[in-house]
Image (spheres, rainbow, N blue to C red):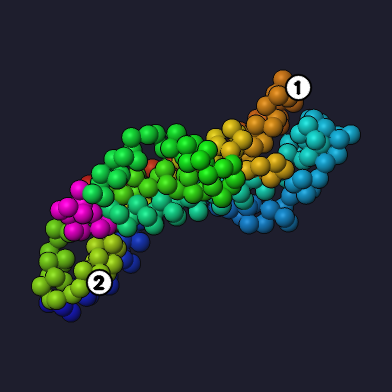
Amino acid sequence: MNSTMAGTTSMRPSSQRRKLWRSLSRNPRAVLGTLVLAVLVVSAVFADQLSPYPPNRQNLRNSLSPPSAEHLLGTDQFGRDVFSRIIHGGRVSLQVGFISVGIALLVGGLMGLLAGYYGGRLDSVLMWIVDVLLALPAFLLALAIVAALGASLVNVMIAVGIAFIPVFARVTRAAVLTVREQDYVAAAQAAGSSDLRIMFKHVVPNALSPVIVQVTLALAGAILSAAGLSFLGLGAQPPTAEWGSMLSTARPFIRDAHWAVTFPGLAIVITVLALNMVGDGLRDALDPRRKDA
């Protein structure tokens, strides 16, 4: 029985990956979202090489210049190139998104795993903590944490990560509760495997599908929340190029130089939309009720 189970588990990941890739490649929205995200990631990684100007270089003689051949997206009130700042701001926004979601996934995923696998009193205590965190909307919770810790980009990452912990805890717990009742988990327990081995070899790999979908959706929410906090002056501090901060500093000039606000706003919209499109595609591809032709 052990050899049969081992063969099944070794074949399952590769077949699932092929099915996932086939389903995603047939979804135009998911393909488009993936391409947009790929462009954003490449732009963020190679921001220094792709930006025509340093993001913080000022030229007051050229302030609030409209888009032109010299400045593709115009300049802001300090004469800084908006295109260069958007590219570098993408690096900051993606960094904030990945780190904050990583914090939420690590802490919330562990809480959900323990609560779902062991149940009982531990489940009640951990879910009570989650319910307390859910009492406030994620953005308001992040706002309160940043206000308590102080305005900085690092504190934004911590605050947004804490705000998204309940979501991952709930999703992981629900997935683990389903996987825990499967026959291969009972077989591993009967074979004398330790709880740690069962959780990370049998439960976690088979409970990843909804968590992966939640990661993409949480990335969009984290980037949006971080931009909102920076817009309020609690996140990235000037002169750091960050999309929310760019919106905040250029807001007084929106009537005379709308491009200084329009293009950072579009960067946020496009990024969040692309992540949601990928998340929707993953959700459709990983849906067990979906019949693959």
- Residue toward you, 146 or 280: 146
Give the crowd class for mark 2: few <14, some 14-19, many >=20 residues within 10 Å: few
Q: Secondary structure at mark 1?
A: loop
Q: Secondary structure at mark 2?
A: helix
Q: Amino acid at mark 1?
A: Asp
For label 2, the residue is 197
For label 1, the residue is 256
Residue furthest bottom as drawn: 3
Per the rendered image, the range of residues in magenta is 113-124
Quadrant where the N terminus is found in the figure: bottom left
Decide if residue 224 is in sight here: no
Which residue is located at x 76 percent, y 34 percent? 76
Name the spot of residue 149 as percent of width and height, x first: 53, 44
Name the spot of residue 129 as percent of width and height, x first: 29, 45
Q: Amino acid at mark 2?
A: Arg
Are circles 1 and 2 on residues that touch, CB within 8 Å? no
| Image position of 219 (left or right of 14) | right
Name the spot of residue 147 as percent of width and height, x first: 52, 38
Residue furthest left as drawn: 190
Q: Is residue 64 above or below residue 7?
A: above
Residue 134 picture quarter: top left
Residue furthest right as drawn: 61
Reply yes or no: does residue 114 show up in magenta.
yes
Which residue is located at x 72 percent, y 43 percent? 239
Decide if residue 258 is in sight here: yes
